[in-house]
Image: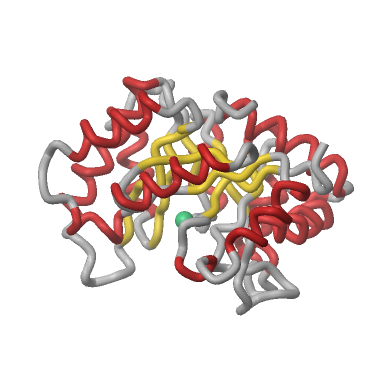
Amino acid sequence: MSRLGIIDTHAHLDDGRFDADRAAVMERLARDMEAVITQGTTYESSVASVKMAEQYDFVYAAVGWHPEDLAGIKSESYIAELEALAKEHKKVVAIGEIGLDYYWKENEPKDVQLLRLKQQCDLAYSLDLPVVIHDREAHGDCLRFFQNEVPKDLKVVFHCYSGSLEMAKELWKRGYYLGFGGTSTYKNNKKVREVLAACPEELFLLETDCPYLAPEPFRGRRNDPAMTEFVAQNAALVRGTDFAHIAEQTTKNARTLFGRIK
Ligand SMILES: [Zn+2]
């Protein structure tokens, strides 16, 4: 087993902030982590994620177009391109990072975002892969979308969950997973901790979203997958249990949702 025995279900290892020391970081992570899932945000970044998964045993890839990057889609063949990546590479474990982002004004309009989300969810379903969902300032539309526009048995994780407890309960009813990362350790973020405390044991995942959103006590620094250790320690406090239990349960959950992880 790895040093920490945990899985970071949401990382961006292709990010430029790892360029200077990526080899050293990866060597350390190979000892620390059970597995890391690195997310695609464009076609190029999806290819980079797949390449890292081929290079490193502990790395797995998600492929997809992030809602902030949808203007980069130049042709409807983008779905066929993602499909080919997922079919050709056994270590592609999900379609992600996809979703809705109404925070940034320069993002594509809502109808375009909803269309791209629908197309990518349909692809995931046809490949029997889960989807990794980014929902920023779009909780209402996200909930409506998943209640009405996808098959009931589509496998879903809402990463870096930031919605209400009421919405979380609707998602749990559908068997959806929630990912908790650095934001669940921030002092002013009571709402997320309330959800973390109430989350059914079998639907809860650890993540970093690195290099962004480093947990306390490293807030503001570059985040990396090994910092899931601090997310897990905080989760143990919030849920009234210990680190070993959180590690064991979340690793089991990640292997259940992302069935292709060894
Ligand atoms: Zn992300």
**Quadrant hosting residue 210:** bottom right
The C terminus lies in quadrant: top right
User: Image point 64% across, 29% down: which residue?
Assistant: 255
What x and y, as percent, mark residue 8? 63, 48
Colouring used for the render: secondary structure
Q: Which residue lies most toward the bottom here?
A: 220
**Quadrant hosting residue 152:** top left
The correct choice, above or below, for 81 with respect to 15 in the image is: above
Q: How many marks?
A: 0
Would residue 72 appear left or right of 243 to someone viewing this image?
Answer: left
Would residue 178 appear left or right of 83 to someone viewing this image?
Answer: right
User: Image point 32% across, 20% down: which residue?
Assistant: 126
Q: Which of these two is toward me, 205 or 214? A: 214
The correct choice, above or below, for 165 with respect to 220 in the image is: above
Q: Which residue lies most toward the left here?
A: 75
What x and y, as percent, mark residue 111? 16, 50
**Quadrant hosting residue 47:** top left
Would residue 42 appear left or right of 106 to someone viewing this image?
Answer: right
User: Image point 35% across, 56% down: which residue?
Assistant: 138
What x and y, as percent, mark residue 21? 60, 67
Q: Which of these two is toward me, 259 or 158? A: 259
What x and y, as percent, mark residue 5? 79, 42
Would residue 128 appear left or right of 185 to someone viewing this image?
Answer: left
Q: Which of these two is toward me, 88 or 184? A: 88
The N terminus lies in quadrant: top right
